[in-house]
Amino acid sequence: MTITIRQAHTKEIPILVDLWEAIDSFPQAIRPFGGDSHDKPEHAKTLIEHTLHSGNASVLVACNETNHIVGTLSGHVFTKPAVNISQIGVIYSLWVEEEYRCQGIGQSLLSQLESDLINKGAEAFQVGWDTANTSAAAWWQKRGYLPYEVIASKLANK
């Protein structure tokens, strides 16, 4: 099986929106700041469009021999003022279709994205995962991403 990693194209936004929605299909804790809204597909479409047209971001896709998209990963370089390392490569929305998992596609996407973000100025990388997703935690930690803080949320009583 041959997999190609490349930059996504604008015409592929509907496919990417579907993949991003699949990410949210995993059981998760309540996420009051996003992920559970009815406008999720439109919000994802807007975010993907913005990322595709940004000079400091990258949206990658993994394609099989028939050019079918089987995975995706995105990221951007964020300037974080007043810290020692101010150019942070923020990584998000890793997805590989189930039948293509455990074949190195996620690692290939990550390697290419890290390289792209370094070329855009990243000095370090940051990624988040849902605390209930122990598979994601193990995958990222195997690649050197170590948790350094917990961000908790609570809905305000109205």
Image (cartoon, grey):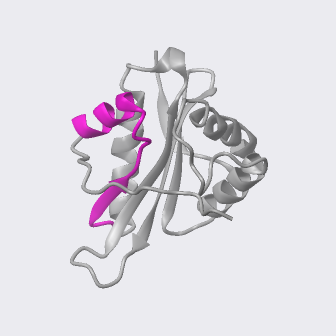
Q: Which quadrant of the figure has residue 137?
A: top left
The residue at the point 34 percent across, 56 percent down is: 126
In the picture as drawn, the residue positioned furthest to the front comes out as: 157
Decide whether residue 117 is among the magenta residues. Answer: no
The residue at the point 38 percent across, 19 percent down is: 102
Q: Nearer the viewer, residue 121 or 26?
A: 26
Q: Position of residue 39 (x, y in %)?
A: 78, 51
Q: Is residue 4 above or below residue 145?
A: above
In the picture as drawn, the residue positioned furthest to the bottom comes out as: 82
In the drawing, does residue 12 fall left or right of residue 141? right
In the drawing, does residue 80 fall left or right of residue 33? left
Decide whether residue 133 is among the magenta residues. Answer: yes
The residue at the point 55 percent across, 30 percent down is: 26
Q: Is residue 107 above or below residue 102?
A: below
In the drawing, does residue 68 fall left or right of residue 79? right
Q: Which residues are magenta?
A: 122-142
Q: Is residue 94 above or below residue 25?
A: below
Q: Position of residue 128 (x, y in %)?
A: 40, 49
Q: Position of residue 99 (x, y in %)?
A: 52, 14
The residue at the point 42 percent across, 44 percent down is: 129
Q: Is residue 105 above or below residue 44?
A: above
